[in-house]
Image: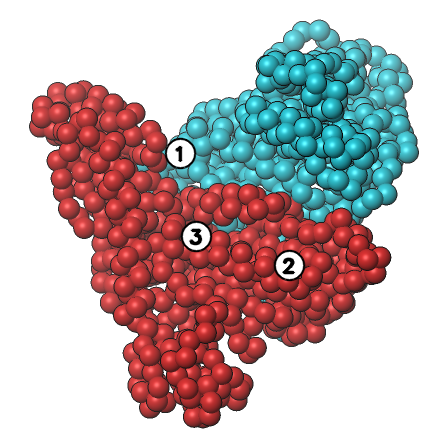
Chain colours: A red, B cyan
Amino acid sequence: MVEQEGLTVKKDNFTEWYTQIVQKAELADYGPVQGSIAIRPYAYAVWEIIQKVFDEKIKKTGHMNAYFPLLIPESFLKKEAEHFKGFDPEVFWVTHSGNNKLGERLVVRPTSETVIYNFYSKWIRSWRDLPLLLNQWCNVLRAEIKSTKPFIRGSEFLWQEGHTAHATKEDADKEMLSILDEYVDLAENFLAIAVLKGKKSEMEKFPGALTTTTFEGMMPDGKALQMGTSHNLGQNFSKPFEIKFLDKDKKEKFVWNTSWGITTRLIGTVIMVHGDDKGLMLPPRIAPIQVVIVPVYYEDKEKKEVMKKVETTKKELKEFRTKVDDRTEYTPGWKFNEWEMKGVPLRIEIGPKDVKKNQVVLVRRDSKKKTFVKEKDVEKEVKSNLESIQKGMFEKSKKELENMTHQVKDYSDFKEIIEKGGFIKTGWCGEQHCEEQIKLETGATIRIIPFKKEKIFSKCVYCNKEAKEIVYFAKAY
Amino acid sequence: MVEQEGLTVKKDNFTEWYTQIVQKAELADYGPVQGSIAIRPYAYAVWEIIQKVFDEKIKKTGHMNAYFPLLIPESFLKKEAEHFKGFDPEVFWVTHSGNNKLGERLVVRPTSETVIYNFYSKWIRSWRDLPLLLNQWCNVLRAEIKSTKPFIRGSEFLWQEGHTAHATKEDADKEMLSILDEYVDLAENFLAIAVLKGKKSEMEKFPGALTTTTFEGMMPDGKALQMGTSHNLGQNFSKPFEIKFLDKDKKEKFVWNTSWGITTRLIGTVIMVHGDDKGLMLPPRIAPIQVVIVPVYYEDKEKKEVMKKVETTKKELKEFRTKVDDRTEYTPGWKFNEWEMKGVPLRIEIGPKDVKKNQVVLVRRDSKKKTFVKEKDVEKEVKSNLESIQKGMFEKSKKELENMTHQVKDYSDFKEIIEKGGFIKTGWCGEQHCEEQIKLETGATIRIIPFKKEKIFSKCVYCNKEAKEIVYFAKAY
């Protein structure tokens, strides 16, 4: 489309800013069903990189991919009571095939524990079959009817769901935690987003889980965002689904399951955390285009020498994801705006003057800083600039997370601060009653119970009884 | 599972043989819904390789991946009448979300033309936006109620569906044909399966297409199998969906669409064509494990030196997909059977005697031939053996295709030969009446109208009028 228009609002107008960036950077478009979107190629390319990074991580640790059916019989979903209660209100129901009414209604998977564990009960017989470490990359559907937002909350999203079976609780705990660590590594070292990690409270855990762990980021509008979860499901599923194995001691036992997932929501997090008034800003390690080269000439006689230099520069940058934007129907200025909107970390401009001087112009997306780089230094400079952008983006996110985390002792301060947003670190007695009252009165929930115990508050922020845990509260997406 | 059992039937008992191989090589397992399966890790790994090969092909030619919604409003599906008629009887209908009845029924995508072209009508404005070359890897569902067979025909399968938009019919034809060529390359040079390629007749083409092209293989039981299709959809969708663009001549025009797909059915084809009485046989280029190394020792004191040699051999073979089977709970003989069942192209055995002689034992899955290979030649020998297996498998398939293709002039011969199976190459007047009668009387359909015109038959095999086309008939899956 020739017409081009930057963002018409700044980032502090956060909701509208997000909506515009999603559309104008061509990341997603609204679908015909409430809360459904098309993930457009540029955003999908980010997802492909995230997939590749995480897929390599889990394959290295012995996990394999598989694929399980989309449609789950109602009776399966009902086998684990908590699980059914959690998902029943938000599933899509298939009732007919062609013109025939089905004998039993089918759920379009909102998550696959029940259908997968039905297979596991057939596949697992002996200790030799354990651990079983499978994962699938697929779509899941949840009929979200309120506050849908592209990537963040919708009726369909893409994810990976790992489902494992182990001989002991200890093995399952170890799996749950090692996956969580891989997630945090992905968030910090690839998405350049600083996160908190820890456990969920009983009230906030996954329906059917024994323990839920999570990692969460803080968005610029002061709301926390759950970026992924890793659960120890205990024997809550292996008992109803009868996933039993004959152990080395000749005794029949139920397995311990874990499940864990990250979704296309991560794309939304990246937009929110890193974008600015000019548009998207992508961390180099997950940017589909790390360097865009824009030839700059205004007369045809200049074209040949400029394009020759563009091509040799591209060749030198072959270890990076480099794109040459040689479209003739757009001006250089138009292209600069487009690639800034799309958050490409580095832009290289090459014009006739640069050809003469054996240099290129390097422009950083983060600082907008422009430098002239000698031809022989291009590869080296691109490399160090990409690294410094990646590092700088994470440092910035880390600082923001720190700035938006408040230690609070008194409930009156709690109420005041939570209105402005951010994490509140405080003491909690461990009683669900206090947690519920705080949620009711402020809208904030316990996002994280850190693994590391600290003794900074001795009393529960709500009831003033002894604090059993130090926790992070926040309002959340 | 410790209990191990080879196939109890030979390949000539084809249906039962296929069922056994799918289960015993752990390729798939039956799901709870009629025609649904779980694709188990080993088969899914084959699919991942196919995905990688084809994904690279289409990205090289400028295609990008995206993702579109699973659920399609009924009104969208109805916009193209032929398309609706073709798919309506076999779709799953979503009628409720949670406890709420939906205002409009939703189709679980059986294919995505209608939902994708709704987006294209928003994204395409000018000739600058063309061609639009998108693809998605996803699941699709079709309520198949009869003759379901894992991988070959089921209620859900995985596929890629390419959807492109072009300015002219010529551009769309070119796209359709170049994709078909990529498919044939995939079939012949990766899956090692010889195929026929060509057009479909009006009766057999995709509901809503202008032209359907296809590539088909011949299965050992004499039935043809459609392995993928590439369509020029003409303006059949761009008109109802109003996908218009302003051309360089300032005139508003409807785009020309193509769509094309290959599915997890390809895995079924590989099983059928290459398997033998011992189990699966995988062409090296798509084998998740190309070489399995099995240490062979019976006493603990031999273990150390054997395992050392196993490790150095594995390191030397790092350019291949190599697995060391060092499980101690199984005997070498048990492992040999397992990897033969799973169709690994090459097995390397290393025992104490081999360590002494600086050699390894190399066993080919295709010929079962055993050779002793000097340590220094291992990499070279593995490479040349994998290449020769790949080539040999394709040659064999090509010969089988030739042997099962019959040139037939008379209808009485036609009826006799078609009972035995295979392709029948014959003359056809081009009238739908003859095509329908032949289908009615013999069960055979026109599988392929070759692109290359030959003048080998002057008369229609059914009506004896002038032949307009030379075509291939067969019974088919």
Sort mark 1 into few (<14), some (14-19) or many (20+) by Cα contacts within 10 Å: many
Instruction: Return the disc, 3 or 2, that comes first in the chain's sequence.
Output: 2
Q: Secondary structure at mark 2?
A: helix
Q: Which residue is under mark 3?
A: A186
Q: Residue A202: x, y in percent?
A: 57, 77
Give the vertical position of A460 relative to B299 (above or below). Answer: below
Q: Is A321 situated left or right of A86 in this image?
A: left
Please give the name of the residue rendered at 52% of the width and 63% of the height, measured from the top-left corner. A229
Give the Cα separation between the discs numbered 1 and 3. 35 Å
Q: Nearer the viewer, residue A142 or B7?
A: B7
Residue A402 x, y percent position in the rendering: 30, 68
- Which of the pair B184/A250 is nearer the observer? A250
Front residue of B62 and A253: A253
Per the rendering, the mark at residue B223 is: none
Say what secondary structure mark 1 lies in: loop
Q: Is residue A129 above or below residue A173?
A: above
Q: Which x, y percent locates residue B58?
A: 48, 31
Residue labelled with disc 2 = A171
Discs 1/2, front: 2
Q: Chain of mark 1?
A: B
Q: Do marks 1 and 2 share a chain?
A: no
Residue type indicated by callout 1? Pro
Q: Which residue is mark 1?
A: B131
Report which quarter residue A294 is drawn in.
top left
Q: Is residue A213 left or right of residue A341?
A: right
What's the residue at 41%, 86% (across, down)? A458
Q: Is residue A105 left or right of residue A221?
A: right
Amino acid found under the numbered disc labelled 3? Leu
